[in-house]
Image: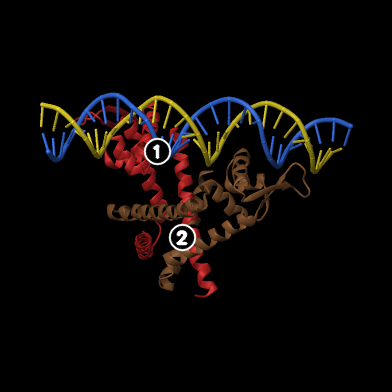
Chain colours: A brown, B red, C blue, D yellow
DNA sequence: CCATATCGTGAATATACATCACAATGCATG
DNA sequence: CATGCATTGTGATGTATATTCACGATATGG
């Protein structure tokens, strides 16, 4: 492999990470406006996707310890975004449910996400978007294969 | 815009963020092995790119407060990755320099970064990589324009 | 009924960040 | 040259995120 090719490859990786960072910056704006933190926003996002959940399932969805979820939910209860109710069938578990305010934040989050997608990719020719998405799919698959080999 | 198109757009964004997360996971492996944390690794990376620096310039490069850099450098001095020396000309500033161990970590970091780029993108047809990189460039430019409009 | 697993949380600890105040130093201007 | 303003690093303090470990309450399979 020629040096020139190598540069192109690392540049592609760098650009992708750069863009991801930029998108992350955009999320910061939402967080500032809503008074939420990154972790709590993430929890709310997962809650929006999964619906009312136990703290355990939130912990595994977020990839953090159950203890940590306790603290995040504490914060979201204090800010009025979620409630902690007894789980309908399991008396050990607590049932985390978004409040009206929480639902509103989730909807806002989804809207802003879609809005960003439209602004970033909406003007691309269909053909180009197809290639782009396919490349991402392939790369994600490649990465998964890589991780399996290592384990 | 049809619903179908909207889904394709958000999927593209989601895939990009997903891949970025996966790449971040790969970094975690390096951090575990080297005993470094994410922030200290980031500082070391910046130091490798910029060469010996003052803490102020590190702070602005990392986008964090100068006070925070003090703490990160404390940790890296303790682990033997960098040294704090008097700045050659400005007696207010300290001159942060990687040690041999720090240099080794930086090199390892760069190698693993290039290795990952090769594994992720190396097998793509040149044409496809070109379109992919061009799309990233365009999208980054679009994002920058977006931010300017808002400010 | 009992052994074992699971759920949430208190306690302790580490890291990553922030702001504010301050001392030491650099620098420009009168 | 002196005086005033800017800059550099850090102590003090506070918050958020995250960990592990221990423990009580509950569930569940045998």
Image location of residue A52, percent across then percent down:
68, 53
Image location of residue B149, percent across then percent down:
36, 63
Q: Identify the residue at image location x=50%, y=61%.
A: A112
Compared across the picture, whether C26 is left or right of A112 comes to left
- Considering depth in this image, is B32 or B64 the residue closer to the camera? B64
- Determine which residue is flagged by label 2: A136
Q: Identify the residue at image location x=75%, y=41%.
A: A92
Q: Is residue B50 above or below residue A129?
A: above
- Determine which residue is flagged by label 1: B41
Distance between mark 1 and mark 2 Cα atoms? 26 Å
- Considering depth in this image, is A50 or A36 the residue closer to the camera? A36
Around disc 2, counting alpha carbons within 10 Å, would you say few (fewer than 14), some (14 to 19), or many (20 or more)? many
Image location of residue C8, percent across then percent down:
68, 40
Q: Identify the residue at image location x=28%, y=55%.
A: A4
What label does residue A39 carry, if any? none
Look at the numbered disc 2 and give the secondary structure of its residue. Answer: helix
Mark 1 vs mark 2: in front: 1
Compared across the picture, whether D8 is left or right of D17 comes to left
Look at the numbered disc 1 and give the secondary structure of its residue. Answer: helix
Compared across the picture, whether D26 is left or right of C22 comes to right
């Amino acid at each position: 492999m020629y040096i020139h090719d190598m540069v192109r490859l690392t540049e592609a990786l760098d650009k992708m990470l750069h863009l991801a960072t930029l998108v992350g910056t955009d999320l910061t704006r939402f967080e500032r406006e809503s008074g939420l933190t990154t972790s709590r926003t993430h929890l709310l996002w997962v809650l929006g996707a999964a619906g009312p959940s136990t703290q355990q399932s939130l912990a595994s969805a977020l990839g953090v310890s159950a203890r940590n979820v306790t603290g995040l939910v504490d914060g979201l209860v204090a800010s009025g975004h979620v409630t902690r109710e007894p789980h309908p069938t399991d008396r050990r578990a607590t049932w985390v449910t978004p409040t009206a305010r929480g639902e509103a934040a989730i909807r806002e989050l989804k809207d802003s996400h879609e809005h960003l997608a439209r602004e970033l990719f909406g003007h691309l020719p269909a053909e180009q978007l197809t290639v782009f998405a396919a490349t991402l799919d392939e790369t994600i698959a490649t990465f998964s294969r890589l991780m399996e080999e290592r384990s």
